[in-house]
């Protein structure tokens, strides 16, 4: 054990500058050797930095993270200004360099610099020398996205149909009865071929099913009460007020775009720009739930692969969990638990481990903990709780965590055998890309130059449930309107009725027979008269 009196408060992590003038480094003590041995992996790994011990940086003792263990999830935590974002950037760079695609939720807007080479300066050169890093300014292949076109980036949208009733019920905070009723609405729309593309489509179907002409449609399977329909509609209105309207629509984003590699073999870094919606956590949460669920049911089981298919980083993760309902937390917990077997790793980046629910925190095998502050009784309580979550340590962790400098962290990861590594105080490497946002003009050019821009930039409001119901209401009486809405799955357009008479195609039949409708049906993976197959999360399956 180190000499605490000679080290003093924070002495275990005193900067290397303070250790200058001591002469050549002494032989490593046994405890430091044991820590270093815990990170001597034989397979591919990410280089995080060099071991800190008793006030000195030991560059020959490299702290690493095995590449196959990235799908075991992780946490990057620490107080404001301690270097969390740079750590995220460092890990993303090395994943990309090893051919692993990366997704970054960029709440503060300072991760766009990943696309540009970094700038050398005295601090960068000093850090590289301290940890024996061969630093070279490097930009990485990146795509920039924005939720529903709110902000700068390629718009990311989803249809209501593919989002599904379970996830929508969770973000609307519906109770069990209301969730079941919303499920009936989706069941009816799926079976009748009424495409729920955006929020107005869902409102239209709910209103139809509680109208005089539509009530009979669900009578045999439970019905939809006027009171429950009112709750759903009011919840949709409040949800839309959070800025979600632009997220639901077409063209729907294919989450498979996040799994691409660049022509040179490096993984594409997908950056979701969120500064414009950081005050709309419900919108952010909605997207996360859909994205993870969509990836989960589309990806095959891979078990323990040589490297992950995608690593997913959520910066400012407290926005995800603040004021979250229990149903929401249950969904996230289940998704994080199961998606590992699909080769997807999820890293939460936040100020304190207590920002992440215990059920989720227990599944995070890799930890990079930056400095914590202990200025208040609550801070001290949080510090003690954080220390208890680490394995046995050769350090005094309470002292260590309050004395770490910027760009230093306490690290423990899963070894190649899946066992926790020894706790290691680490001086982290410097990112090789630009540490800060790129200029707005450069970001705009990168977005418009992307091959995905033409595919997703322009919103499309095609004829769907709302337009079809409005057309039927304007053209027919109540009985005929109900017949027009439900006729699509009973007979083909123009099929003779009893008596041999040929009836003219209804409004619904004309729409169903159009080429535009058939194209839309293919895009959401369903056909008229056939109910959509939904995953365990209630999202609609789509063929890639």
Image (spheres, helix red, strand yellow):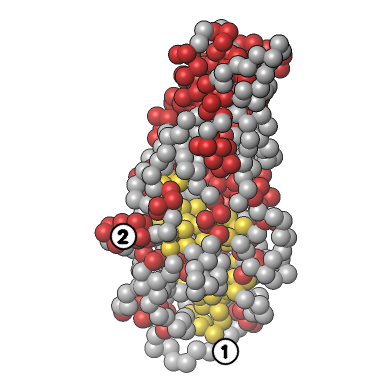
Residue that badge 2 annotates:
445
Q: Quadrant of the N terminus?
A: bottom right
Q: Is residue 377 above or below residue 343?
A: above
Mark 1: few/some/many CA within 10 Å (<14, 14-19, 20+) = few
The furthest residue to the front: 500
Q: Earlier in the sequence, mark 2 or mark 1?
A: 1
Give the camera-side residue of 248 and 3.
248
What residue do we see at 40% from left, 75% from top?
A: 138
Q: Position of residue 407 (x, y in %)?
A: 43, 68
What residue do we see at 57% from left, 89% from top?
A: 27
Looking at the rendered structure, the secondary structure element under dot 1 is loop
- Between label 2 and label 1, give the one nearer the viewer: 2
In the picture, residue 513 is in which quadrant? top right
Q: Position of residue 479 (x, y in %)?
A: 58, 8
Mark 2: few/some/many CA within 10 Å (<14, 14-19, 20+) = few
Horizontally, is 256 left or right of 457 in the view? right
Looking at the rendered structure, the secondary structure element under dot 2 is helix
**Whether residue 107 can be seen here:** no
Q: Is residue 448 above or below residue 409?
A: above
Q: Position of residue 34 (x, y in %)?
A: 65, 78
Residue that badge 1 annotates:
27
- Total labels: the figure holds 2
3D distance between C-alphas at marks 2 and 1: 53 Å
What residue do we see at 61% from left, 79% from top?
A: 36
Q: Position of residue 21 (x, y in %)?
A: 39, 88
In the picture, residue 395 is in which quadrant? bottom right
Give the camera-side residue of 156 and 59.
156
Horizontally, is 300 left or right of 238 in the view? right
**Whether residue 509 can be seen here:** yes
Horizontally, is 322 left or right of 509 in the view? left
């Amino acid at each position: 054990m180190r000499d605490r009196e000679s080290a003093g408060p924070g002495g275990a992590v005193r900067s290397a500058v303070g250790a200058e003038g001591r002469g050549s480094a002494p032989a490593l003590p046994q405890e430091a050797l044991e820590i270093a041995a815990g990170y001597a992996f034989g397979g591919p790994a990410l280089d995080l930095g060099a071991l800190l011990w008793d006030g000195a940086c030991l560059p020959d003792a490299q702290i690493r993270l095995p590449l196959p263990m990235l799908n075991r999830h992780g946490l990057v935590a620490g107080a404001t200004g301690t270097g969390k974002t740079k750590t995220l950037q460092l890990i993303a760079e090395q994943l990309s360099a090893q051919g692993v695609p990366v997704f970054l939720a960029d709440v503060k807007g300072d991760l766009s610099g990943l696309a540009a080479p970094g700038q050398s300066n005295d601090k960068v050169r000093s850090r590289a020398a301290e940890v024996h890093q061969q630093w070279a300014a490097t930009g990485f292949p990146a795509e920039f996205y924005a939720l529903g076109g709110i902000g700068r980036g390629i718009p990311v949208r989803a249809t209501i149909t593919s989002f599904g009733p379970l996830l929508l019920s969770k973000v609307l905070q519906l109770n069990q009865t209301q969730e079941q009723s919303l499920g009936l609405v989706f069941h009816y729309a799926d079976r009748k071929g009424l495409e729920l593309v955006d929020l107005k489509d869902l409102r239209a179907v709910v209103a139809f099913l509680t109208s005089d002409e539509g009530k009979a449609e669900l009578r045999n399977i439970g019905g939809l009460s006027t009171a429950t329909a009112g709750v759903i509609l009011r919840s949709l209105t409040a949800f839309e007020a959070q800025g979600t309207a632009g997220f639901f629509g077409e063209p729907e984003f294919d989450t498979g775009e996040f799994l691409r590699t660049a022509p040179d073999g490096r993984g594409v870094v997908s950056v979701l720009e969120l500064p414009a919606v950081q005050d709309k956590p419900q919108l952010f949460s909605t997207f996360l739930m859909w994205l993870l669920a969509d990836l989960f049911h589309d990806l095959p089981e891979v078990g323990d692969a040589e490297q992950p298919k995608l690593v997913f980083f959520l910066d400012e993760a407290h926005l995800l969990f603040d004021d979250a309902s229990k149903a929401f937390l249950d969904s996230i917990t289940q998704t994080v638990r199961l998606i590992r077997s699909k080769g997807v790793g999820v890293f939460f980046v936040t100020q304190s481990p207590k920002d992440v629910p215990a059920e989720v925190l227990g599944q995070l095998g890799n930890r990079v903990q930056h400095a914590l502050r202990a200025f208040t009784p609550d801070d001290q309580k949080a510090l003690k709780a954080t220390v208890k979550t680490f394995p046995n340590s050769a350090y005094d962790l309470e002292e260590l965590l309050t004395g770490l400098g910027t760009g230093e962290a306490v690290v423990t990861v899963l070894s190649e055998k899946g066992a926790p590594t020894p706790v290691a105080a680490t001086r982290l490497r410097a990112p090789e890309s630009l540490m800060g946002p790129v200029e707005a003009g450069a970001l705009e050019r990168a977005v418009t130059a992307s091959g995905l821009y033409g595919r997703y930039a322009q919103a499309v409001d095609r004829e769907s449930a709302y337009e079809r119901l409005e057309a039927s209401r304007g053209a027919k009486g109540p009985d005929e309107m109900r017949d027009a809405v439900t006729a699509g799955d009973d007979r083909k357009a123009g099929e003779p009725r009893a008596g041999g008479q040929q009836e003219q195609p209804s409004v619904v039949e004309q729409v169903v027979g159009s080429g535009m409708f058939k194209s839309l049906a293919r895009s959401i993976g369903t056909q008229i008269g056939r109910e959509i197959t939904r995953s365990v999360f209630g999202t609609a399956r789509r063929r890639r």
